Structures are given as C-alpha cells and as structure tokens.
Amino acid sequence: MLFVSDTAKSKIDEIKLSENKPDAFVRVTVSGGGCSGLSYKMDFDTELKPEDQVFEDKGIKLVTDLRSFLYICNTTLDFSDGLNGKGFEFKNPNATRTCACGESFAV
C-alpha cells in the first residue's frame, strides 16, 4: 500500500485544479541515481500501464510499477511548505539511509 498525508492530499488537489487535470493520478517511480543510490520521481499521469500497481488513499490515486513498489511499499507521500519546507517528500520505512536533501535513498 502507498499512503498520502493530509497536507499532500491538499496540495495535490490544489495542483490538479490549477492545471485543470481532474482525472490525473500521481505516478511514483524509483530509479537508480542520486546521492544514496535510488531516486524518487513523481508526475501526474492519466494512462495506466498493464504492469501498474494502483492504490488509493484519501481520494488520491497513486500508481507505481511493480519494480518501484518493491522499494516504496508502505511509503507515505507528504508535503511541507514551512520555512524549511521541501515540497513533496517520501516517508519510506524501507529506506536504510537517505541523503540530506531527501531526494534519494538506499534500502
């Protein structure tokens, strides 16, 4: 399962409204790279692929491929916009380490 915090839900709803993409879902993928070895990527998408894993939390649809899901199972998508806010961030219980910027991780 993938999860969405209340603040991330609000920001996603706001972006979908401002970009006029009411039917878009959030696609999350993991690829090699970054300071710690693996990097997150997040985009809006409207087309499902046969290998997609689909989850819904708080009315937000999150989609990932099976390979990425193995790295991000039980991860929560969060959003922070305070003084030190980073924007969207992933709270991944599978990560054994993360880089200081929070953009990459290792398992």
Image (spheres, rainbow, N blue to C red):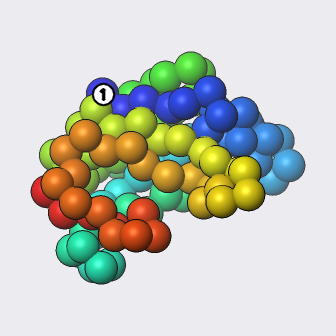
Q: Left of 2 or right of it: where is 71?
A: left
- Residue 98, placed above or below residue 24: below
Can the viewer see residue 66 in this picture? no
Image quadrant for the C terminus? bottom left
User: Which residue is farthest front?
Assistant: 83
Q: In front here: 93 or 82?
A: 82
Residue 29: image location, x then y, percent: 35, 57
Q: Residue furthest right?
A: 18
Rendered location of residue 93, percent (x, y): 25, 40
Q: Residue at x 50, y 31 (%)?
A: 4
Q: Which residue is mark 1?
A: 1
Query: Where residue 102 sits: x, y (%)?
Result: 42, 63
User: Is residue 94 visible from the viewing direction of this image?
Assistant: yes
**For the view shown, which residue lies furthest in the top direction?**
58
Q: Nearer the viewer, residue 85 or 64?
A: 85
Q: Quadrant of residue 104?
A: bottom left
Which residue occupies 42% across, 30% down?
A: 3
31, above or below 96, in the image? below
Q: Amino acid at mark 1?
A: Met
Query: Secondary structure beneath disc 1?
Result: loop
Residue drawn at point x = 62 percent, y = 27 percent:
6
- Please tell me how crowded label 1 is: few (under 14), some (14-19), or many (20+) other residues with Cα within 10 Å: some
Write down the quadrant of residue 99 in the picture. bottom left
Instruction: Quadrant for residue 41, please give it.
Output: bottom left
